[in-house]
Amino acid sequence: MLTPRLRKTAQQQETDYANPASLVIDDLVAYKRFEKILPLQSDTIRSLQSGSFLSPFRGRGMEFTEARPYQAGDDIRHLDWRLTARIGKPHSKVFQEERERKIFLWVDLHPAMFFATKGAFKSVIAAHAAALVAWNAAQQGNRVGGIITSPDHHTEVRPLQGKRGVLHFFQQLVQHPAWQHPKKGSFSAPGDTFLRLRRVVKSGSLVFLFSDMRNITSDDEMQLSQIARHNDIVLCHIHDILETMLPPAGRYKVTDGDRTTIIDTGNAPFRRQYAASFALRSEYLRALCVKQGLHLISLATNADLVQTIRNGLGRH
């Protein structure tokens, strides 16, 4: 992928990141000061965006605690048939609300994420957004874990509670090989990542996806559908302004660090086609979220990250 070297305006300077093309753990730890601003409880989150999931999040799940002899009024659906058959007397399963909810963070570090013309690389934005959610999840008593993925490396992080869980996730995120050796080349699809996510996510979890969501396949849609059956999913669509429209007509030198080429943006039909392509992809994601019951947040690389996610989750 190519990273245009464009001059920064005074407005762009306001959205600069300390490390726009790399990741250090101190930057993620700094989001702890925002640990009380996101509504992650089931009775407080409602979408305010067009095309987003309009229902409140489902909330914590129920976990099995014990089995006891059947009592009048017990739900027959909760009978423990194995124990009943072994003992010869009916027994019911007893459930209680889980004390904490599991929050899974999927951070996409595929090649297309190492790109930006304003703000910071999409990969850096994804990591910072995940840090914001992680601190809020831990502050509200939830366990934090997830999957960090690139074409060659998939790191699964088991959900842990509190500050320990957050810092463990940050450590795995910062140490992921993609930061040292991001692959250059064509854009790639998530692949089997959602299948991996489906296998590790426990029912009743809240799942955040931080990605530009390029080249999603029908198999990916199917896996998302299966995950959404028993979990809540927030899709955070990360994009750069250059992906929405081309810069003013002219000739621009762009580079990926090794190769350099010239892009001519003076062709009007091509400019319209380029803008229409991003609009179609955005509409596709909106329709996908409506169809599968996902919550959609659109996050530009030069936007106010904290305010965008806060508003996207329904709190002003």
Image (cartoon, rainbow, N blue to C red):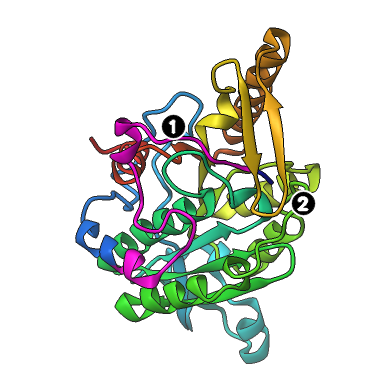
Viewed as shown, does residue 101 lie left or right of 147? left
Q: Mark 1 is on which residue type?
A: Leu
Nearer to me, 99 or 305: 305
Give the image location of residue 298, x and y in percent: 47, 35
Is residue 178 in the magenta section? Answer: no
Q: In the rendered image, which residue does mark 2 sit on?
A: 185
Q: Mark 2 is on which residue type?
A: Gly
Neighbours of disc 2 within 10 Å: few (<14), some (14-19), many (20+)? few
The answer to whether one can see residue 283 in this image is: yes
Neighbours of disc 1 within 10 Å: few (<14), some (14-19), many (20+)? some
Give the image location of residue 162, x and y in percent: 31, 76
Give the image location of residue 307, x and y in percent: 29, 40
Q: Residue at x 70, y 12 (%)?
A: 267
What whole-number distance in Å separates the C-alpha atoms at marks 2 and 1?
Answer: 38 Å
Give the image location of residue 269, x and y in percent: 72, 9
Q: Residue at x 42, y 70 (%)?
A: 144
* Residue at disc 1, secondary structure: loop
Q: Residue 230 bears which disc, if any?
A: none
Q: In the rendered image, which residue does mark 1 sit on?
A: 54
Quadrant in the rendering for residue 61: bottom left
Q: Residue at x 67, y 46 (%)?
A: 225
Q: Which residues are magenta?
A: 3-29
Q: Residue at x 32, y 70 (%)?
A: 26
Q: Is residue 286 above or below residue 296?
A: above
List the single residue furthest toward the bottom. Answer: 87
Of labels 2 and 1, the one closer to you: 2
